[in-house]
Image (cartoon, rainbow, N blue to C red):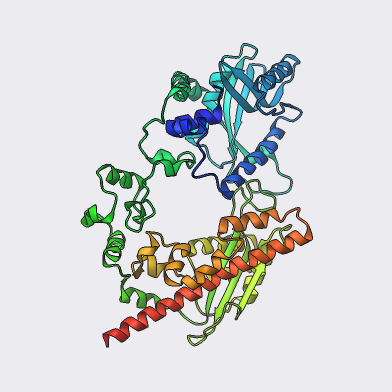
């Protein structure tokens, strides 16, 4: 068996997942579009990192030709090349491709390049495995080992400077100390393919760390998504859920409610009574704070791993689209197309000034601005204000009027078992407004992560392709803002009906 660094890291994370992967078992939880996007981001960052050592030689990847790639690398070293990209080595059944290698007077420095904005433990494990292999190569003398990440504080100003974009972490001493452990781990992982059946591994926090396992459904209970599964309990740490499962407690009827938080108790009560739990006072307190006209507002954003606009940071949330439905008064029973404003910025330019000016123009100067989970909207508005100081005062006034529609649900005013412990709009809407939820299912885009990818992918597309993408984005964002109107109207009906029944 040939052990690559990705296989090594998988074996460290979970021997069962390694065995399933090695034996060709189909993945039950494959990577989604967002995960695939991160892979693309890693490739983009890797290309820019090469500029740290310009003029180097890249070792071409030849599918399954591991010995050939190793030979090409050793030949380049023999020829006197002093900077290598994707240097490849096969030794003792272990194969690595090193992002960057640079020769100094003291020996070769080794660099593992990561697209994240901070150093993680898994990065050190990755580098440690490579260092183990490199130490067995007689043709090279090693000097230092580094991990390179993006600098989260970097702000683009003009041409991107790789020396400022990245942070280097010197880890030679730490990596050397890990070598005896790495050697033992390689031995243990290399034995896994000989097992006649998958190893027995308990579920735990490792199932999603450092990466979400592609075989989660092979290990977690079949009832994990049931309304009464302990895994749906809101805000209960995974370690606590697993501890309960280890005691044979997998459903609500087996748990001691007195040990739980009020919102978790509400979950169980609503399920056991087979009826939504309503706190009329909390709902009325929220409703009494709402002022007309109500602006139902929803942002969409994108992020660039490597900033492309001045004033942009790595992974910075860049507002690029909004949808706005305005309800003039309590008697205004608007349809999805009534009093609606929408905006999508030109995908080829910095969107912030254009979207800020459009918001100021279209949002009413009074009344509540209703959003769902407003910390995101507030952060976006602050971002716009910082970028557009001449518009800052008007933009920041909007934040003072924001109201969070998640409050009556997350705050205990209304809980429905169909929420399954989640208060996201995608969980709340089907339970209260199933007719509106159908609109999501008919869309080409059904969640924010996909919307961000569609927006970014318009770069370089044809005019016809851009037109189609913009139409899909408009439809998605419009459904989001109108869904808030539908939810708020439902809350008003619930309060009215409860009060009527009390009379």
Q: Is residue 280 above or below residue 143?
A: below
Across and down, in percent, residue 75 comes to: 73, 16
Q: Residue at x 62, y 40 (%)?
A: 42
Give the position of the C terminus as an image quadrant: bottom left
Q: Residue at x 37, y 51 (%)?
A: 224
Residue 255 visible in this rendered orientation of the protein: no
Camera-side residue: 330 or 445? 445
Across and down, in percent, residue 102 comes to: 67, 24
Across and down, in percent, residue 409 comes to: 38, 67
Camera-side residue: 455 or 119? 455
Side (left or right) of 499 relative to 130: left
Residue positioned most to the right: 463
Q: Is residue 321 above or below residue 369?
A: above
How many marks are shown on the rendered structure?
0
Q: Is residue 436 above or below residue 99?
A: below
Side (left or right) of 155 relative to 81: left
Residue positioned most to the top: 138
Across and down, in percent, residue 420 comes to: 38, 59
Q: Residue at x 62, y 56 (%)?
A: 452
Q: Is residue 365 above or below residue 422?
A: below
Residue 80 found in image quarter:
top right
Side (left or right) of 51 relative to 247: right
Give the position of the N terminus as an image quadrant: top right
Q: Residue at x 61, y 28 (%)?
A: 111
Camera-side residue: 77 or 265? 265
Residue 246 visible in this rendered orientation of the protein: yes
Side (left or right) of 32 relative to 279: right
């Amino acid at each position: 068996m040939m052990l690559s660094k990705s296989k090594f890291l998988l074996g460290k994370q979970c021997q069962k997942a390694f065995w399933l992967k090695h034996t060709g078992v189909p993945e039950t939880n494959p990577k989604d579009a967002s995960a695939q996007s991160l892979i693309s981001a890693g490739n983009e960052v890797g290309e820019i990192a090469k500029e740290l050592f310009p003029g180097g030689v890249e070792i071409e990847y030849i599918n399954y030709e591991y010995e050939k790639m190793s030979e090409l690398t050793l030949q380049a070293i023999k020829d006197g090349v002093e900077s290598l990209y994707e240097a490849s080595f096969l030794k003792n059944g272990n194969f690595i491709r090193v992002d960057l290698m640079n020769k100094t007077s003291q020996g070769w420095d080794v660099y593992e390049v990561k697209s994240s904005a901070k150093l993680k433990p898994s990065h050190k494990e990755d580098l440690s495995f490579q260092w183990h292999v490199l130490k067995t190569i007689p043709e090279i003398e090693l000097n230092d080992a580094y991990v390179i990440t993006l600098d989260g504080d970097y702000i683009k100003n003009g041409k991107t400077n790789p020396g400022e974009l990245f942070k280097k972490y010197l880890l030679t001493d730490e990596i050397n100390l890990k070598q005896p452990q790495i050697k033992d781990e390689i031995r243990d992982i290399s034995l896994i393919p000989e097992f006649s059946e998958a190893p027995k591994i308990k579920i735990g926090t490792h199932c999603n760390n450092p990466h979400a396992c592609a075989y989660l459904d092979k290990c977690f209970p079949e009832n994990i998504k049931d309304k009464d599964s302990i895994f749906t309990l809101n805000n209960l740490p995974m370690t606590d859920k697993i501890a309960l499962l280890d005691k044979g407690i997998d459903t609500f009827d087996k748990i001691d409610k007195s040990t739980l938080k009020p919102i978790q108790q509400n979950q169980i009560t609503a399920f056991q009574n087979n009826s939504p739990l309503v706190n009329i006072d909390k709902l009325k307190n929220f409703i009494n704070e709402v002022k007309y006209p109500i602006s139902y507002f929803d942002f969409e954003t994108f992020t660039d791993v490597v900033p492309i606009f001045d004033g942009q940071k790595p992974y910075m949330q860049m507002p690029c689209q909004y949808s706005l439905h305005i309800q003039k008064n309590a008697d205004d029973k608007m349809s999805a197309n009534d009093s609606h404003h929408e905006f999508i910025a030109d995908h080829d330019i910095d969107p912030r000034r254009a979207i800020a000016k459009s918001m100021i123009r279209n949002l009413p100067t009074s009344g509540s601005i209703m959003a769902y989970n407003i910390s995101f909207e507030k952060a976006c508005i602050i971002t716009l204000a910082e970028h557009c100081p001449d518009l800052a005062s008007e933009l920041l006034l909007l934040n003072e009027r924001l109201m969070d529609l998640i409050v009556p649900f997350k705050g205990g005013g209304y809980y429905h078992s169909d929420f399954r412990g989640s208060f996201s709009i995608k969980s709340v809407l089907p339970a209260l407004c199933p007719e509106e939820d159908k609109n999501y299912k008919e869309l080409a885009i059904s969640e924010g992560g996909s919307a961000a990818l569609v927006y970014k992918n318009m770069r370089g597309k044809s005019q016809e392709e851009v037109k189609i993408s913009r139409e899909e984005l408009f439809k998605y964002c419009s459904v989001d803002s109108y869904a808030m109107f539908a939810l708020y109207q439902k809350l008003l009906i619930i309060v009215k009906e409860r009060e009527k029944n009390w009379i």
